[in-house]
């Protein structure tokens, strides 16, 4: 799939932008803080409804637009998919920067929910922050798994939303029981729901990680010129071991229920749920060495790159369509071997948008086939193919 | 007549405070309403005040079904031609209005006044569950229909009630879930659709 047209209104630093894009490669060049990243962010948002950069949605609105009354930031894209064109729009409205933001989603002009939109457009975003996936906290890796899975499986997103609500209710109930304001029997429903939705998340995440591991193993060997063997391992929050290779929901669900029962006394004492996919993590091993703890910055960066390339291949295999690749200022961090390899790998995809502060990192024959754009102070000027 | 927040207008300040407690009324709306009430004629103001008092003094909960009513038992519980062997359990009084509009249901109701939600501090004891169980004692109730909302809290409530009622030998049913009437299959989300497939019936 690929974005044919992108339209931004009062979004971030843009007051207004109409941008026509075509298939294949696009290089967005410009200085720092000129709006390159926000273009990629816009496409990422249309696919996932979530910003890769901010958690407070009011920051998406261009508050300098001024005027009376509420302000609206609006994104619109026309995307070409194998089955035809689709129009997606997200609008954020708020009275003031400190007021709550109302989000409205339309697909082909019809108002839709988040769960209806996610999965319509598939993206993989490469960014300089990806190194935190390897070296950072487990929550970042769970979020990574959630975004990748939700894009190809709408039941995953539904289960995730439900799981998070069950978890919040159950934690409250555990504290009420601890304080003798509720009965332990009231846990039954929440335990069953937690096991129902949690087992689905567990099985899907395990499947995703196993697939990514196989793909990334091959990609990582190429990126390190045949050198290093990468393995990605799923560490389920329901505890390891006993399940062996039998990871079907019918097996995981009773297992999760059993472990909840075992953990109950400790859970009541602490007032929180100790077993389930909210405690999942994944581990990256290079030649058996845990990259989270022992990886050098360079190794972590290369592993992150392999992971993103694997994610793109996973989506292609799962959805049957090319995801849109967004590369946000990742080239400057890489040596020439990895840079060349990355550009070669992504060239196989239907649409790739790459931001860069200058064109030094690109081979001339790569630039010759890329559409170039100059991003400058909230304007985007097409320079044509090959610049 | 700009009164503002000067100390002499203390009753106005108090009115603003009271209005501010209402759901959906922020400080700005409360001020606007207070100044509107201030300009009302004395008769109009008295009529509004009486209406508010009447709600508190004259409207009570039906001792049978816990619905809001002026007379106890309520019109539905007293009604002729209602089937006393079926009780439909709902979360809120408004749900009864919705079900009554269908004109298809002839049984009785029971209002829980909420749904189980630990995060909001609502457990079984906060709901009218004891009252429901005592209605089932020694009376020929054949079926209890659980018509709580199809969300997590409504389901938790239904599941809890089923655990209490089924052992009494009473049939417990749940409202069907699935496609909205007049909807297009094409536009149904996958979760709704898979629920509808699970809950399919003989054609």
Image (spheres, helix red, strand yellow):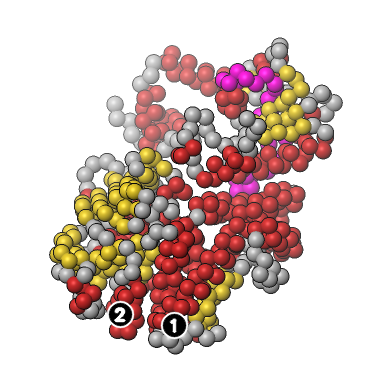
Q: Is residue B1 left or right of residue A104?
A: left
Q: Residues within 10 Å of mark 1 (few under 14, many from 20)?
A: some
Give the residue drawn at x 55%, y 70%. A210
Whether residue A147 is situated above or below residue A176 in the rendered picture: below
* Position of residue A322 measured from the top left corner of the image (x, y, whole percent): 37, 61
**Regarding mark 1 in the picture, which secondary structure is present there?**
helix
Give the residue drawn at x 57%, y 37%. B178
Q: Given contact means CB atoms under 8 Å apart, are the residues at marks 1 and 2 in contact? A: no
Q: Which mark is residue A221?
A: 1
Q: Which mark is residue A340?
A: 2
**Regarding mark 2 in the picture, which secondary structure is present there?**
helix
Inter-mark Cα distance, 1 to 2: 15 Å
Which quadrant would the C terminus of chain A be assigned to in this image? Answer: bottom left
Q: Is residue A372 left or right of residue A322?
A: left
Please check the rendered image and state whether residue B112 is part of the magenta-colored stretch, yes or no.
Answer: yes
Residue with the most extreme top position: B80
Callout 2: residue from which chain?
A
* Position of residue A386 measured from the top left corner of the image (x, y, whole percent): 17, 70
**Pointer 1 and pointer 2 on the same chain:** yes
């Amino acid at each position: 799939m690929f974005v044919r047209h992108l339209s931004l209104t009062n979004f971030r630093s843009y007051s207004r932008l109409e941008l026509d894009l075509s298939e294949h490669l696009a290089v967005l060049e410009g200085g720092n803080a000129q709006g390159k990243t926000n273009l990629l962010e816009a496409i990422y948002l249309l696919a996932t409804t979530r910003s890769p950069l901010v958690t407070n949605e009011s920051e998406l609105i261009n508050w300098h637009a001024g005027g009376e009354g509420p302000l609206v930031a609006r994104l619109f894209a026309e995307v070409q998919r194998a089955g035809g064109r689709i129009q997606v729009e997200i609008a954020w409205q708020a009275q003031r920067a400190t007021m709550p933001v109302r989000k409205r989603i339309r697909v082909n002009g019809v108002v839709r929910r988040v769960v209806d939109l996610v999965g319509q457009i598939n993206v993989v975003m490469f960014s300089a922050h990806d190194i935190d996936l390897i070296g950072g906290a487990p929550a970042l890796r769970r979020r990574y798994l959630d975004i990748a899975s939700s894009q190809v499986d709408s039941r995953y997103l539904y289960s995730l939303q439900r799981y998070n609500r069950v978890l919040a209710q159950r934690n409250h109930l555990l504290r009420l029981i601890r304080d003798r304001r509720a009965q332990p029997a009231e846990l039954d429903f929440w335990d069953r729901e937690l096991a129902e939705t949690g087992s689905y998340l567990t099985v899907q995440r395990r499947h995703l990680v196993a697939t990514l591991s196989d793909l990334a193993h091959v990609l990582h060997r190429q990126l390190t010129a045949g050198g290093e063997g990468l393995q990605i391992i799923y560490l389920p929050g329901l505890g390891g071991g006993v399940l062996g290779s039998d990871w079907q929901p019918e097996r995981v669900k009773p297992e999760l229920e059993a472990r909840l029962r075992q953990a109950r006394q400790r859970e009541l004492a602490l007032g929180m749920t100790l077993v389930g996919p909210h405690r999942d993590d994944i581990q990256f091993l290079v030649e058996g060495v845990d990259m989270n703890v022992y990886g050098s910055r360079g190794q972590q960066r290369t592993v992150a790159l392999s992971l993103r390339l694997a994610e793109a291949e996973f989506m292609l295999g799962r959805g049957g369509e090319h995801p849109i690749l967004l590369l946000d200022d990742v080239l400057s961090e890489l040596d020439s071997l990895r840079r060349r390899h990355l550009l070669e790998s992504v060239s196989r995809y239907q649409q790739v948008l790459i931001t860069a502060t200058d064109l030094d990192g690109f081979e001339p024959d790569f630039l010759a086939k890329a559409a170039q754009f100059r991003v400058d102070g909230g304007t985007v000027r097409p320079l044509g193919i090959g610049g | 007549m700009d009164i503002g927040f000067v100390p002499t207008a203390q009753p106005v300040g108090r009115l603003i405070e009271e209005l501010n407690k209402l759901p959906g009324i922020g400080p700005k709306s409360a001020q606007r309403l207070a100044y509107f009430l201030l300009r009302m004629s004395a008769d109009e103001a008295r009529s509004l005040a009486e209406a508010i008092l009447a709600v508190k003094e004259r409207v009570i909960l039906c001792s049978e079904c816990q619905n809001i009513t002026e007379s106890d038992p309520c019109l539905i519980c007293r009604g002729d031609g209602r089937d006393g062997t079926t009780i439909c359990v709902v979360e809120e009084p408004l749900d009864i209005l919705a079900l009554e509009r269908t004109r298809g249901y002839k049984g009785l109701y029971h209002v829980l006044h909420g749904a189980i939600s630990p995060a909001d501090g609502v457990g079984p004891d906060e709901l009218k569950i004891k009252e429901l169980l005592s209605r089932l004692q020694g009376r020929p109730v054949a079926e209890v229909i659980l018509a709580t909302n199809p969300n997590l809290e409504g389901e938790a409530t239904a599941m809890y009630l089923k655990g209490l009622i089924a052992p009494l030998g009473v049939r417990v049913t749940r409202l069907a879930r699935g496609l909205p009437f007049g909807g297009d299959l094409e536009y149904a989300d996958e979760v709704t659709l898979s629920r509808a497939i699970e809950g399919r019936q003989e054609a």
